[in-house]
Structures are given as C-alpha cells and as structure tokens.
Image: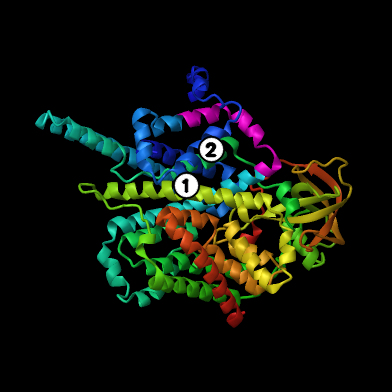
Amino acid sequence: MAITTEPAAPTTDPPQQPPAPATPAAPAKESPAAPAKESPDAPANAAAKDGWQLNSPLVLTMVLLLVVLAQGPIRQALSAPVMQSWMTVFVAVVVQALPFLVLGVLLSAAIAVFVPPTFFARALPNNPVLAVPVAGMAGAILPGCECASVPVAGALVRRGVTPAAAIAFLLSAPAINPIVLTATAVAFPRNPEMVLARFAGSLLVACAMGWLWQRIGRTDWLRLPAHEPHEGETKGAAFWGSVRHDVMQAGGFLVLGAMSAATLKAVAPASWLRTAADNPVVAILALSILAVLLSICSEADAFVAASLTQFSLTAKLAFLVVGPMIDLKLFAMQAGTFGRGFALRFAPATFVLAIAGAVVTGAVLL
Amino acid sequence: MNRQAQAAVLFLVGAALLHAGFTNLYLRYVKAGLQPLLLLSGAVLIVAALATAWYEWRRARMEKAHAEAHAEAHAEAHTETETHEDAAHEGHVHREPRIAWLLVLPLFALILVAPPALGSYSAVRTGTAIQQPYGLSKLPASNPLTIGLVDYATRAVYDHGRSLGTRQLKVTGFIALDKSGSPYLVRMALNCCAADAQPVKIALTGKIPPVLQPDTWLEVTGTYSAKQTKDPINNRPIPYFQVTLAKPVPTPKDPYDESWNQ
C-alpha cells in the first residue's frame, strides 16, 4: 500500500541515498553494522543526533521503503543456489529459535518484576559452593533450548543470585531438561547410556564452570544492562519494558549467530568430516568445533549427532555436551546479555571444560 | 533505535511470525509441531509492541504535562527542562540496544524473499542420512502403494525389500543430480529446523525422463530394486528404485520428511 500511495518516494529518495538502486542490500547492512561497532561511545552518537534530525523511526521507514522498492533486484541477487540455501538456513534458525527466545524472555521478565529477590536468597543455599549444583539441577525444569536460558540467567544475576549459580543454570538448562533428554533417547535407540552420559556430562561441566567462576571470576567482567524499574513505573510497564528490551537485544544477537551458522552450513563441505573421524582425538575435537559452528538447537542436536555414524560415541557425546553450552549463536547472545568482556573469557573456558567433561564422562559411562 | 522504532520492529516481526504460521510458509523452515509455539510467540511480540507503544505514549504525555508544570513554576530555568526532555528522549540515560537493527534482516528474508525449502544444492553436498530403523510398521495392502521416500529407502536397505516385494510403489521427492549427472530422488529429513535437515536419497533407474531439472518434484511409480550404491560423501548405502512412470508434481505442503519426529 505504501508504494502505491506514495509515488513521490522513488524520486525523492535517490538524492539522499545515491547508491541505493545499484547495491540494494547496502543500506540495510550498513545501518546495523556501523552502530554496533561504536556502541561503547554513545555520547558521540548522541551529539551527531542533535545536529541531524535522523531519528530511528525515520531510518526504519526509509530502509523498509527502499527494500520494498528494490525487491526485484534483491531477489535476483539472491537467486543463486548458495544464497538460497544460506537464506533458508538463516531464516530457519531465527524462526526456530524465536519462540523459545520469547518464552525465555517472558520468564526472565516475570522473574525480574514479580519474583522478589528474597525468594532466591531463600531458595538457594547460602554457601555458593552448594548453590552451584542446586542451580545446575534447577536447569532441568526449564523446558526448551539454549536461547531461552540466556535471558533467564541474566535476570537471575540481576535478581541477586550469585553469578556462579546463574552460570551453572545457564549451562545445564539447555542440556538436561526432559525435552532434550527425550530427544536424545529417541535419537540413540541402541545406546540408552547416551542419555545418562549427556545428563551427567552436562551437569558436571555446568557445576565445574560455576565453581571455576566462584574461584577466579570477577564481577567487573560482567556488564549487565541496567534494568531496574524506574520509580513510579507500574509493574506492567516494567514487565513489558523488560520483554521489549530483551527481545530486541537477544534477538539482534540471535540474528548475528544465525548468519554465521548459515554461512558455515552453506559454504563448508561436509566431506572433510570423513578424514577427521579416523583419529579418535581429532574426532572429538572436530565434533566439538562442529557443534560450536553449527549452532543447532539443543532439542535437535542429538539427531544430527546420531547421523554422524563414522564417529565414536565419545566424540558424539562431546558434540552433545559442547553444543548447548557454547556455539556461535550463544556466544553472540551471551556477549549481549553479560557483556563482551565476560563472553570472551567465558566461551573458551566453557569449550575446554566441556570437552574435558565429555571425555571423562565418556570414559566412565560409554 | 528508539522505542517507537522498536515497537514497530516488534510488531512487524510478530506479524511475520503469524503470517508464516498461518500460511504453510513456516513448513519450509521448521517442523510442523512448532506451529502453536510460533503463533503464540508472534502474538506475544505483537502485544509487546502494542504495550510499548501505549506506555511510550503515556510517558510522553505525562512528561509533557510535567514539563509544562515545570516551565510554569520556573519560567527562567528552561535549560533544565531541556536536559530533562533530552534524557527522556534517549530512554532514561541507558542506551537502547543498537544490535536490534539486525532484526530487520530476517524480517525482509521472511516477508520479501521467503526462500524455498532446502533443495538439491544441499542434497548433493551432504551424505545420505539413512538410519537403521528399530522396528518397521506393517504396510497397507493397497496396490499401487504410496510410500514415503525415507520409508522406502529404509525398507530397501535394512529390510532388503522384503516388505515391498514386487508391488507397484509411488514415491515423491525432488531431483538432485550428482557430479556425473546421475539422478537421485531426494527428500530432506528434518528433526527441528532446516539447519538440521539431512537428505535421504534413492537412485533412479529404468524409465527416467530424458531431461531432469534439479529441484523439480516428481512422483515416480515403479518397483523395488535390489541394486544399491554408496554415497561418495559418507559411504552410506543408497538404494535404487525401478521407475516405470515419472510425473511432475507440485511441491508438497510440507517439503520435508518428518517421520523421524514420530
């Protein structure tokens, strides 16, 4: 409708955005990439805003209008099979993850607004060393995949839960909830011990990471966005404000992660996996890296692991333990929720500990 | 991105999810079982957008009234009102997430481009994902029998076609050609979303149409063939299918095989 009622738009827009018809994707891509880089120095940006009355609704309208007008060339550019397959995987990861993200965001907003901080103080043991395994076990009650656990863990920390316990929850929830364990049992009908190994391995690594944070973690690595309800704000306003903020932020990072996962899936050849399967050590490492790069939802990863038939069970277990704890999508979302300084330290440590945990569990159980 | 723009993006993303969920568009990307969750989250996003717009409007009105009262009280101190308004405009000092701009990308992808379900490009790059079944169900007695491609491949490889015999079979899938040009009929099997979709392939022999275009959907009629080949990518077995008749069909409602989810 907007196109037909505004015939003036195509003639007025080009002077402001000269390269628009030639490279239609450019304006849409530039706008998110550029601000993302300069996010820490917000004042400079605010100053620029004073001079230019280019506010975000206007930019958004212009971007939408341009893309709608240029949809023919855009479709043409995206008709190559690689691009189509990229787009399909990209859209699939986002569409698949959004419902779980929304679920997690609603839960986290409810925690932030309706659950008093004293509740967690009473529910968790005072001793943080004990609080870690309790929080890790509590992960079993959050149904869904890893996208839901990031905002919830953020809300827990903001609600005064010790970060060590929140980390244990963050890592265990996507791997040990009943839905994921059921899917694992279905995917490995001949190896029921895989379910137990996944449960034990994931819980072990989650607790180990919690205790590790307890020993060497520093709160200044965490940069949680301020979220406290403003004075005079009703509970409804605080709740929906939190939902809006978390969906926009975590959703943006989800898109970033989905783009990298789609790139890998569309570009990397599957045949290199065959050579990796021959050496048992390389096999474990290869599947761990694959889990990080593929960023598959934890409810589905067991089926993918089961299809990697040429690999050992321990290598598959590493895939199942690493994947829900750290992958490209999760890294992006953790960086958004807890700050980049945290994510950069947390991700490698999780990766190494998850592999170690999987190998130890595999040696004992498989 | 300020809050009005965020409300707009939330609304559009929610509407896109509802659109995909109500049409069969979502089946190109995720499993059928995700539909209720998809619709629910779309509705929640729209409510969040409306709530944001409503609170934003109310806040702006209250702030205006506040500022007017302020200005009347101290007419000379208008610098203070200005900074106050400025802070309000920037969303109370703490910045709004800029990464949120990325959310417009899936929006465009879903609404404007709506990429097709994974096809021959992914199929020839990935090894066949045939899995050993734990128990085969009894087939209905009809002849010709319409059978899922994954079901056929599984029975042909792991049951050596015993349950298929010499019956006329109808199998639907899309065409993929390997490097040497030999045709396969493929169905992508899916567990959760297209990111984990894997192809199951059967090789075609017999009366194959002379010109085959990759990604066209065919319903082939024919019989079980005991011949097998190996997928060069992962060395897993690919059974053959003896074709007597091949007819082009439109893309099925759900392009993926979801029998593994049951």
Q: Chain of mark 2?
A: A
The reply, left or right, for residue A274 in relation to residue A335 is right
Label 2 Cα neighbours within 10 Å, binned few <14 / some 14-19 / many ≥20: some
Element under disc 1: helix
Element under disc 2: helix
According to the picture, the residue beneath numbered tag 2 turns out to be: A29
Amino acid type, callout 2: Lys
Where is A328 relative to A9, above or below?
Answer: below
Residue depicted at 82% across the width and 54% down the height: B203
Amino acid type, callout 1: Gly
* Residue A246 position in % (x across, y down): 39, 50
According to the picture, the residue beneath numbered tag 1 turns out to be: A252
For this rendering, which residue is in front, B100 or A346? Answer: A346
As measured in the structure, the alpha-carbon distance from the residue carrying label 2 to the one carrying label 1 is 13 Å
| Residue A66, magenta (yes or no) | yes
Question: Based on the displayed image, in which of its 4 quarters is residue A197 positioned?
Answer: bottom right
* Residue A84 position in % (x across, y down): 66, 42
| Residue A138, magenta (yes or no) | no
How is colour applied across the structure in the image? rainbow
Residues shaded magenta: A62-83
Question: Based on the displayed image, in which of its 4 quarters is residue A134 positioned?
Answer: bottom left
Residue depicted at 77% across the width and 59% down the height: B233
Where is B31 relative to B62, above or below?
Answer: below
Decide whether the magenta segment is chiefly helix, strand or loop. Answer: helix
